[in-house]
Image (cartoon, rainbow, N blue to C red):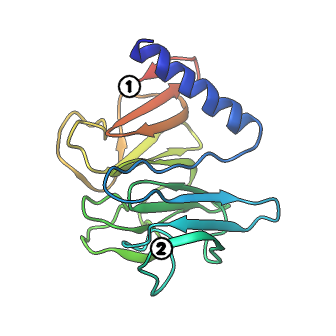
């Protein structure tokens, strides 16, 4: 199967999950055990796996968490990268935590943060996506924002410079869905065009 068909299948599956009202969260890491989060029917967020950079938002818990436990500080839609996590609150604010080694939590720091904190100076968002070391966010009016590692151009600003803080990405108008993968980003327009 060629790469384009594979990407289309992934986007279709993601769209089915979203339309069904579910959440889809995963972390892909070659260096650390996977972080997995899920939203239960009771609305609680559960987390388990590696927490070495605070990506589970648990204070003083460095060791891996071998079984699901409630993460009380995370109330809404969640996504996770290699060692960074984020949630979107009901007002569209983006909260991030974990490692910021390549600015993947959208703050001008290089120290891990083990508690959710809102990203300043961005508009309200309707969806977020995290990947290996970068994140995307989508506004209600279809604009894409990105931050973090840009080694392979995954930020989409025409450079290979890391985005220290979130920045709006031009050239992708009227976007309805976003997705991230290992060092790449995707955006689906309202008219059905796929930007990669």
149 to the left or right of 48? left
Q: Which residue position is annotated with label 2?
A: 117
Above/below status of 91 relative to 22: below
Spot occupied by residue 130 in the image (x, y as percentages of width and height) = 45, 50
Say which residue label 1 marks. Answer: 196
Residue at x 82% of width, y 59% of height: 41
141 shown above or below 81:
above
SS class of the residue under badge 2?
strand
Q: Nearer the viewer, residue 102 or 143?
A: 102
Q: Position of residue 131 (x, y in %)?
A: 41, 47
Q: Earlier in the sequence, mark 1 or mark 2?
A: 2
Relative to 179, 102 lies left or right: left
Residue 175's x, y, as percent? 52, 31
> Is residue 115 something one can see in this rendering?
yes
Disc 1 packing (10 Å; few <14; some 14–19; many ≥20) = some
> Whole-Å distance between the Cαs marked 1 and 2?
29 Å
- Asked where in the image residue 10 lies, by quadrant, the reply is top right
The percent position of residue 72, horizontal first and vertical second, equals: 65, 77
Q: Which mark is residue 13?
A: none
Q: Residue 44 falls in which quadrant of the image? A: bottom right
In the rendered image of this protein, does residue 144 appear above or below residue 66?
Answer: above
In the rendered image, the residue lying farthest to the front is 66
Residue at x-position 51% and y-position 36%: 178
């Amino acid at each position: 199967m060629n790469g384009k068909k594979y990407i289309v299948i992934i986007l279709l599956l993601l769209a089915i999950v979203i339309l069904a009202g579910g959440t889809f969260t995963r972390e892909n890491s070659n260096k650390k055990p996977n972080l997995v989060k899920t939203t239960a029917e009771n609305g609680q967020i559960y987390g388990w796996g590696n927490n070495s950079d605070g990506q589970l938002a648990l204070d003083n818990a460095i060791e891996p968490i071998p079984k699901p436990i409630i993460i009380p500080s995370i109330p809404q839609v969640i996504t996770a990268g290699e060692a960074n996590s984020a949630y979107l609150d009901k007002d569209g604010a983006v909260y991030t935590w974990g490692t910021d080694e390549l600015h993947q939590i959208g703050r001008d720091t290089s120290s891990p943060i083990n508690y959710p904190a809102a990203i300043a100076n961005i508009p309200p968002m309707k969806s977020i996506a995290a990947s290996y070391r970068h994140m995307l966010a989508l506004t209600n009016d279809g604009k894409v924002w990105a931050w973090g590692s840009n080694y392979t151009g995954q930020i989409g600003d025409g450079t290979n410079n890391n985005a220290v803080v979130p920045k709006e990405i031009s050239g992708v108008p009227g976007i309805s869905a976003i997705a991230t993968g290992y060092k790449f980003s995707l955006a689906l327009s309202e008219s059905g065009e796929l930007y990669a």
